[in-house]
Amino acid sequence: MLENSKAFSSFSVNDLQQAKDFYSNKLGLKVIDNPMGLIELEINGSSNILIYPKPNHEPATFTVLNFPVDDIEKTVDDLTAKGIVFEQYSGEIATDAKGISKNPEGPMIAWFKDVAGNIISVIENK
């Protein structure tokens, strides 16, 4: 029934202008103003992702957006230079000093939060 539908994702933020600035200036993404009062992230090869304002927004406790990258070390270094702070985890998904989880049973991945506290990751293609 839905196998031919071009699905897309969306999530909320508490301040649309701050989100627009973050995704555009910190992450370097193309951000489009949508006439419905929200913004869209235009990502090559993907459906646009909608971000909508929600006055009683609560940050997601799970990863809302994953960015596959070819070189996670370089990506983390570049984002850190732009002021992105990577999460530090211990236990099963322990991260190194840079915030990269190098679990031998899975891909290398690092998590950070957007300005609304939503969790985003960069994950190495391998």
Image: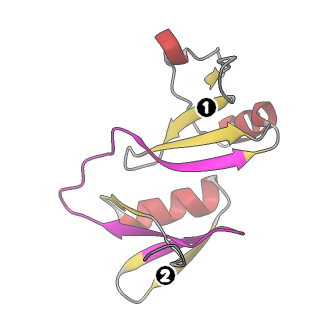
What stretch of residues is rendered in magenta?
39-68
Q: Residue 90: percent from the left, percent from the top?
A: 49, 11
Q: Amino acid at mark 2?
A: Asp
At x 62% / y 59%, what residue is drawn? 25
Find residue 10 and report its horizontal and vertical position in percent: 41, 65
Q: Secondary structure at mark 1?
A: strand
Q: In the rendered view, would you say 117 is above or below 35?
A: above
Mark 1 or 2: the one toward you: 1
Which is nearer the N-term, disc 1 or disc 2? Answer: 2
Q: How far apart, in angstroms, are the residues tagged by discs 1 and 2?
A: 28 Å
Task: Look at the image and tell me whether residue 89 can be seen.
Answer: yes
Q: Nearer the viewer, residue 70 or 13?
A: 70
As helix, strand or loop, the secondary structure at mark 2 comes to strand
Judged left or right of residue 86, residue 17 is left
Residue matched to label 2? 33
The image quadrant of residue 11 is: bottom left
Residue marked by disc 1:
110
17 part of magenta stretch: no
User: Compared to 71, does 94 lie above or below?
Assistant: above
Q: Residue at x 49, y 70 (%)?
A: 8
Q: Amino acid at mark 1?
A: Ala
The C terminus lies in quadrant: top right
Front one among 1 and 7: 1
Q: Choose top left, top right, bottom left or bottom right for residue 119.
A: top left
* Residue drawn where x is 56% and y is 30% of the image: 86
As for residue 57 lying within the magenta part, the answer is: yes
